[in-house]
Amino acid sequence: MSRAIDVLVLGGAGVDTIVRVPELPLPYADSYMIDSGIRTRAGQTGDFVAVALTALGLRTHHLDFLGDDPEGDLVRALHRDKGIPLTAVPQPAGTKRAVNLVGPDGRRLSLYDTTRAHPDDRFPEDTLRALAGASRHAHVSLTQPCAEALPVLRETGVTLSTDLHDWDGENPYHEPFAYGADVVFLSAAALRDPERTLRRIVGRGRAEVVVATAGDKGAYVLADDELTHLPAVPPPAPVVDSNGAGDAFAAAFLHAWLNRETPLRSALFGTIAGAHACTVPATEATAIGLDELLTRAAAV
């Protein structure tokens, strides 16, 4: 059956305020002078995945809650400028927002405002079913209320992916995502034993592939009961910001996976896109294009 949408991105729309700080952790002081400026721009995890997928030529649609506020206008403008269809469910609590402290080495500390949602928020089921039914695949963000959408998505038969970010392998909030998706991404940063966590995700859930990214140490891919370590790909320019690297990895992986590449080949695409994202300042919402991705993959 022909589908009008390649990837439905669910959740993760919002606005970040970027602050470059002299070091992380930031020592206490009464004040700091920020010579690089403090900038607010549209782009949280779902936005970045949608931008990256679109840059790779996939037909992408984004669904999330947005407020009728200046932050929501920034998100709408980003999607309009990038040519990404957006279905925005009204959110009286306002658009999600965060503050990202970025150190000189590109590491970041994110402060998320959790007041921009209500516990009883739900995506309209008719809208969710219609968009999922028109999609080849759905990528589900961790943001509330995406967990409640998982059963409906599964009923439509669409394949699912998710990014658990810095899950420690224990927080129960992440479990519906970890055990309900066909492709699971996460960071290895908070994992004491990455292989154990990856195998538990496969054993308890439905995942065909689980990928743990490890920054400059590369990535670990569990597929067909075999764990493989892929080394990192050197970035093409100096690293300035790691914000969005995981989203770029996921988008490039999904592009390859949806085009029937192997999990390892898909992960190679992900490492290249993630390395490229680290060279892009956090104030920009840009992603690697398909031609550049394929050229670098051929070189590797």
Image: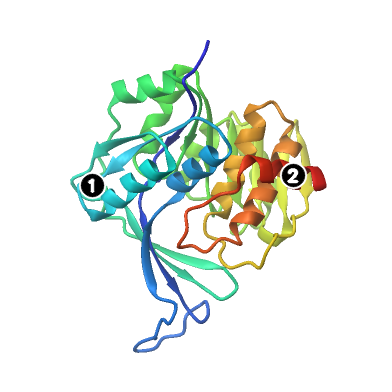
> Which structural element holds mark 1?
loop
**Residue 26 screen position, x and y as percent:** 47, 80
- Give the distance between the C-alpha atoms of the residues marked 1 and 2, in whole angstroms: 40 Å
> What's the residue type where badge 2 is placed?
Thr
Q: Position of residue 90 (x, y in %)?
A: 22, 39
Q: Are marks 1 and 2 in contact (CB under 8 Å)?
A: no
Q: On the picture, is 294 further left or further right than 174?
A: right
Q: Position of residue 295 (x, y in %)?
A: 74, 44
Callout 2: SS = helix
Mark 1 residue type:
Gly
| Furthest residue toward bottom | 30
- Judge left or right: residue 24 versus residue 198: left
Q: Residue furthest top?
A: 1
The disc label shown at residue 295, or none: 2
Q: Which residue is mark 1?
A: 67
Residue at (44%, 19%) from the top-left corner? 134
Report the front residue among 153 and 226.
Answer: 153
Within-10-Å neighbours for mark 2: few <14, some 14–19, many 20+: few
Label 1 neighbour load within 10 Å: few <14, some 14-19, many 20+? many
List x then y, in percent, for residue 155: 44, 18
Discs 1/2, front: 2
Work out whether mark 1 precedes mark 2 in sequence or the reverse, and give the earlier one.
Answer: 1
